[in-house]
Image (spheres, rainbow, N blue to C red):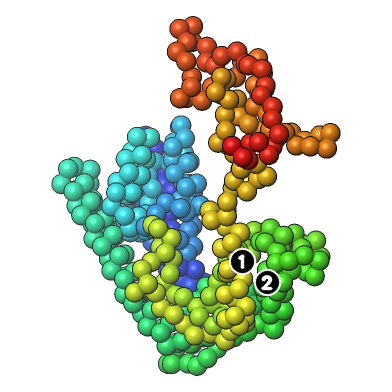
Amino acid sequence: MTLPLRAALYLRVSTARQAEHDISIPDQRRQGEAYCAARGHQLVETYVEPGSTATNDRRPEFQRMIEAGSAKPAPFDIVLVHSFSRFFRDHFELEFYVRKLAKNGIKLVSITQEIGDDPMHVMMRQMMALFDEYQSKEDGKHTLRAMKENARQGFWNGSRPPIGYRVVTAEQRGAKVKKRLEIDPLHTETVRLIYRLGLEGDGTSGPMGVKAIVSYLNARRIFTRDGGRWGIGQLHKMLTRTTNIGRHEFNRASPKNGRKPAGVIVTVEMPPLIDQVTFDAVQAHLRARNPKVAPARIVSGPTLLTGICFCADCGGAMTLRTGKGRATVTTRARSRRVRARPAQRPFDPDGEAGRPGCRPHRGPIASAGAA
């Protein structure tokens, strides 16, 4: 007697809004269960992915299914999808995971696109995957075009608003509800306090850096809008966001280099939280504290030759020593054998790097500065 094939049903929709409507996933489930019943398959597992794109594999349920399908022995014989686009909208990734499952004896089956295993049907599946990928990119292009026009008209395209703002209904055009951002009075003072700390400090010192502001807020239990503690990256992003001065940039981020060209960025006018003068002053302080711009401690230290002056005999670095009312500079080996700098490292036939340390050379700091 032939055992029935064990099937795993994978259901997916692209957006959370589609999942909330609760139409597509129940229909995919109904068709999958009917397919299994008509062919005598045993449905052993169902994986539901509500609101995840198929252009990549960053999907929790998808990864759980692949992990289960890679186990030995395999818990199912086929992965059942409504169409190949539910599995992937990327030609390369689809073929990669199809072959990965096939190595464990698992086959990908589409309810609406039934094909065989011969080379011609494999080619057909690959062509359908290419069309799915093309259609996904076309849809994305048209969606972005519509969202950019919506932003040009001053409306909010969605996502969570920045701290200090909230989303309100602006108008209704047919079935579409247009929204804008307005100042959130609940968190306005927190944002202004952060800028004031970055510009003036807390009264006991000068302008505070990002880390100091984070410590100040967390120590005084001034939490984020979610009730959590502030983080360095989160606060730095808020301090540098131009939305706070009334200019929100839409379509700015790029997955490749972090920022798109200025020609494709849409600036949306918003009610400002911070005046331009305060914002510019805070940015100047942040740039001055930037570790990529500010001199390293080895340069800004009290001894100008630190990191530059080395002993000619052993290669030991110069260090500063204080005591007995005066400061001296010293070059000395920290151990019996020190690793010399590459230019001074001798050839060692025994394979031991370095050479015996020499006697330390000491001198007044004034003489080192004069030298």
Identify the image quadrant of residue 241: bottom right
Real-space Cα distance between discs 2 and 1? 8 Å
Image position of 240 (left or right of 263): right
Residue at horizontal 42 percent and vertical 51 percent from the top: 57
Outermost residue toward the left in this view: 120
Q: Residue 188: x and y, percent? A: 68, 80
Asked if 144 appears above or below 78 in the picture, the reply is below
350 over 102 or under it: above or below: above
Residue 236 screen position, x and y as percent:
60, 64
User: Which of 101 and 159 lies nearest the eye of the viewer?
Assistant: 159
Earlier sequence position, callout 2 versus callout 1: 2
Position of the C terminus by quadrant: top right
Residue 19 shown left or right of residue 34 in the figure: right
Quadrant (top left, top right, bottom left, bottom right) of the N terminus:
top left
Taking the spot 58% from the left edge, 84% from the top edge, the residue there is 272
Nearest the viewer among 255 and 82 is 255
Give, as a three-letter code, the residue at label 1.
His
- Regarding mark 1 in the picture, which secondary structure is present there? helix
Pointer 1: what residue? Answer: 285
Q: What residue type is labelled 2?
A: Leu
Residue named by callout 2? 199
